Each structure stands twice: as C-alpha cells, then as structure tokens.
Image (tube, rainbow, N blue to C red):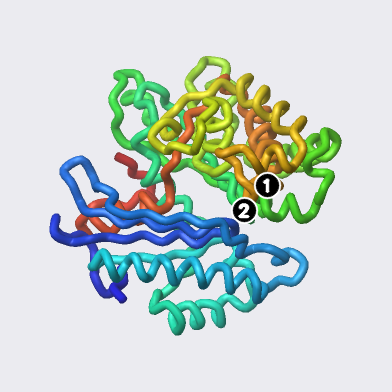
Amino acid sequence: MPSAASAGRGGGFRDVYAAIDLGTNNCRLLIARPSPEGFRVIDAFSRIIRLGEGLVGSGALSEPAMARALEALRTCAGKVRRRRVTRLRAVATEACRRAGNRRAFQERVERETGLQLEVIDIEQEVELALLGCAPLLAPELPEALIFDIGGGSTQLAWLSASGSEAARGRSGGRELRALASLPIGVVTLAERYGRAVTEVAGFDAIVAEVMEALAPFRRQIALDAALAAGQVQMLGTSGTVTTLVGVHLGLARYDRAQVDGTFIAVDTVRSVTRQLLALPLAERAAHPCIGEDRADLVIAGCAVLEAICRCWPVGRLRVADRGLREGILLSLMRPASEPRVRGLVLP
C-alpha cells in the first residue's frame, strides 16, 4: 500500500493521490489526479462509523466502533488498490488522539487493511483543513473565522490578511493568528445530553456550555471592532452546516455541487434549526439530507453553531463541503519547496 512517507512530496500528472480522514463520526476518502486547476476527483467514499462512541466514559475505542471503522477502511483500501493509487495519506483525528488503545488500533488497521494510519495532532488537522478550504475565502475581507464542528471536538481558526493587502483588495497571504480546539463535538454532546439534546431546554443548555468554552478564545482574538466594521467573514466546514444548507434548499438528496461555497444567512440557520427542533426523531431521520445516522446528532451540531454565531455575529456564513481531505491531497501534490500553511502562508 503506498504511503505519503514513502512517496515524498510532489509528483506528476500521472500520479494518483488518495486522502483518508478517519474522524470521530465519519470515515472519508478522496482519490484524485492533479490538474492545472488543482485536482480532479476520480473516486470518493464516506460512511458514518461513530468511532468515538462511548469514548468519553471509557477512554478507549470500543470493539463495535473499531469494527465499523475497519469495515469502512477495508472499503477505502479496496478503492485505493483498484484505482492504482501511487501516493496516499491516511489520518485519524480526535477519537484516536483521545483513545488509550489507539496504538493497538493502528496496528490492527495496518494488519487487516494494509493502511498505515497516522494520528495527527490538532495543529496538523487545522493546517490541512485550512489548506483545503482557503479558496473559498473572500480576498476583500481582511479577517476570517473558520470553524469545524466535528464528532469529538470543535476547531476554530482566526486568519488575518495584512492591512495593505486587504485595503487593495488583493488575495495575498493570510496569517494564522490563533486557533482553538474545544473537546466538544456532536457525538460527545449527543451521548451526554441524551434525549434532552432534542428539546429546547437541552438545546439552550448546550449553547450556554459552548459559549462559556469559547469565551477565552473570543477574548483572545478581540474582533468586536472588525465585526462592527463588516470586515469579518465566517466559513464553516462540517457536516452540521452542510446538512443545514441541504435542508434549507429542500434538496431531494444531498448534492455537494449545490452546497459547497453557498452563503446562508444566520437568521436562516436559526429558522432551519427551529424547524429541526420541532421534528420528531423519525421525521428528521427520514429527511434525505439528514438520514438515520445523523438524526440524533444534527441538533447538537446546531447548538454549537448557534453558540459560534452568538459570539461572532457576522450576519451570514459561507459553507464548505471541503477541508481535511482536500488539504491532504493538495499537500501531497505540491513540491517540497513550497511553504506550509502552518507559519501563516495561505494561497
């Protein structure tokens, strides 16, 4: 099985690249070839596996959760072989970072699938996600907040363009000024609050908890003046925001092409959230953009999103159905001499 370590950096247009993202809730794969515009996706896979189920209480990955993840990873490995992938990076995030049995799980993954699973730290995860979604940032707005509401954690990053570049409306480079990672995600919240997560009181309790957790980061970045001047943009890259857009658009089935890059007003987000709160679990599960696997998680995600919007009232969000996997692909494709995102350089 090819790996990023053995393949090195960069490559030619004949190479086939693959990125696997094993998160707390999902297992995702993208396979692509380089193109003049960046890359062209030739295969993809996504499955909800809930790897972090029960992790908060036990401190370890459970056997059922690992079995679900391994089944998904075997599917990924089969696609990698069939597509003759030459350069591959497979990463795991929050659930594996927390798990006391992560090394045993990594060894089992390699033994049963042939994949070398790399557990990356928070800084690497944010760096790669920023690289993947940076093209959606508006160059004319100097300040940017990017967030990812995950299954086991929520990350936020503050990026800032230099004043001279922003004033001239040039895209230029953006500086990664600060980042925060909260140990709060949709899976952990849904497990902790149980049925109460779908009630108004439970929703409000989550919003209050997340706002309290965000308070130190809010004080650190001090964007009130920039918000008042309309100089801040917000970009969300998570299943919560893409699901909300799909519901808002009334899609008969989820369509990435109609969701990625879409703007949605915060008032619209709140309206859709109220609609979802009013629906019984079975009706949420029946919605084509939610489904059974997300029906008990989407409200927790909406509560985290509401807390973020209250802390930084920007008026509207841009939604990214892209992030970590795309960032992995771009990092594998670029020459070794190119600067990294960490240390502040974004295209």
The residue at the point 51 percent across, 70 percent down is: 71
Question: Where residue 204 sits: x, y (%)?
Answer: 80, 35
Report the front residue among 252 and 72: 252
Height in image: 81 above or below 167? Answer: below
Label 1 residue SS: loop
Report the front residue among 130 and 319: 319
Most distant residue in the top direction:
229
Q: Image quarter for residue 281? A: top right
Does residue 46 appear to the left or right of 304 in the view shown? Answer: left
Q: Can I make out residue 273 in this image?
A: yes
Question: Where residue 98 sits: x, y (%)?
Answer: 63, 67
Return the mark for residue 151: 2
Q: Which residue is the site of mark 1?
A: 297
- Give how far apart the Cα atoms at labels 2 and 1 are: 9 Å
The residue at the point 35 percent across, 26 percent down is: 139
The residue at the point 53 percent across, 46 percent down is: 179
Q: Image quarter for residue 218? A: top right
Q: Are marks 2 and 1 in contact (CB under 8 Å)?
A: yes
The residue at the point 82 percent across, 33 percent down is: 200
Q: Number of callouts in the render?
A: 2
Question: Where residue 207 sits: x, y (%)?
Answer: 75, 37
Label 2 residue SS: loop
Q: Give the amino acid at mark 2.
A: Gly
For the C terminus, which image quadrant? top left
Q: Can I make out residue 121 in this image?
A: no
Report the front residue among 142 and 208: 208
Q: Give the amino acid at mark 1.
A: Leu
Q: Nearer the viewer, mark 2 or mark 1?
A: 1
